[in-house]
Amino acid sequence: MRVIAVANQKGGVGKTTTAINLGTALAAVGRRVLVMDCDAQGNASTGLGVELAARRKTSYDVIIGEGTLAEGIIATRVPNLDLVPGDENLAGLETLLHDDPRKNFRLRDAFDAHRAAGGMYDTVLIDCPPSLSTVTINAMVAANAVLVPLQCEFLALEGLSQLLRTVDLVRGALNPGLEIQGVVLTMFDKRNNLSDQVAGEVRSFFGQKVYQTVIPRNVRLSEAPSFGLPAILYDHKCSGSEAYIMLAQELMQRERERAAA
């Protein structure tokens, strides 16, 4: 079970869009995928068509120990794709766990218990909140790797160094095996020279860590969540859907190369 945290403390960079559409594309080729919604806004849950009334146990319950991972799992309308929903209670987790010496390991413990009980997925994608909070640290401690969606604008670069420092801190103190799985350039506008400049800077800094696939700025990607559907189901021929299908293929190739190394 490969656990990937989809993280960037900046909001509006495409974390949720990436989690649900990458997850859908992986599920479409037969991978068993779990999306874990760890954002208090619950956008991944909404984007996968899971209504509030159906969210009986959430990632909040899993992290605080009031429910197991298995109890939080909901099947979505996408074959092979399950969800652990999120809710607004996640916003109060920082205060609730403040004095808990194992506050950063709660999600890892839940995954370990799920594995021990025989529960398995090929890929788990954790949709992290737009902050470097206790929830995000839990995701990084539980994860094998971090996937970073990065919007193609200069302001998006400013917070990247802080995220990388956090990954280094987690690797040094809490999860030695954590790696940067890759950086995904999102909201790319081919009509805008700025997008090209930002992409060039990111590629010069991260090199091969940056995916060749670039996610374009696309109206259909924005519309799909309001219908409770991943864009790949809403309009599989739009440029955004095609890009996420290509991203999934590239991710699987990277994973094969990692496993063979």
Image (cartoon, grey):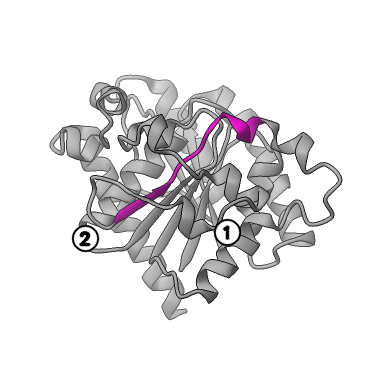
Is 33 left or right of 124, judged from the image as shown?
left
Task: Name the residue at 24% across, 34% down.
Answer: 231
Q: Secondary structure at mark 2?
A: loop
Between 82 and 53, the one lying in front of the other is 53
Task: Name the residue at 70% across, 63% down.
Answer: 175
Question: Image height check: is 175 above or below 46?
Answer: below
Task: Name the residue at 63% across, 53% down.
Answer: 140
Question: Image height check: is 239 above or below 175?
Answer: above
The type of residue carrying mark 2 is: Val
Is 176 left or right of 26, judged from the image as shown?
right
Q: Which residue is mark 1?
A: 143
Q: Which x, y percent locates residue 91?
A: 65, 30
- Is residue 177 a member of the stretch shown in magenta? no
- Distance of mark 1 from mark 2, alpha carbons? 23 Å
Q: Secondary structure at mark 1?
A: loop
Q: Which x, y percent locates residue 145?
A: 55, 58
Residue sitting farthest toward the bottom = 260
Q: Which x, y percent locates residue 73?
A: 42, 52
- Asked whether residue 39 appears in the rendered view, the answer is yes
Q: Which residues are magenta?
A: 81-91
Between 138 and 66, the one lying in front of the other is 66
Residue 251 position by quadrant: bottom left
The type of residue carrying mark 1 is: Ala
Q: Which mark is residue 127?
A: none
Residue 172 position by quadrant: bottom right
Task: Name the residue at 44% across, 39% down.
Answer: 55
Q: Which residue is mark 2?
A: 29
- Asked whether residue 213 appears in the rendered view, the answer is no
Residue sitting farthest toward the left = 237
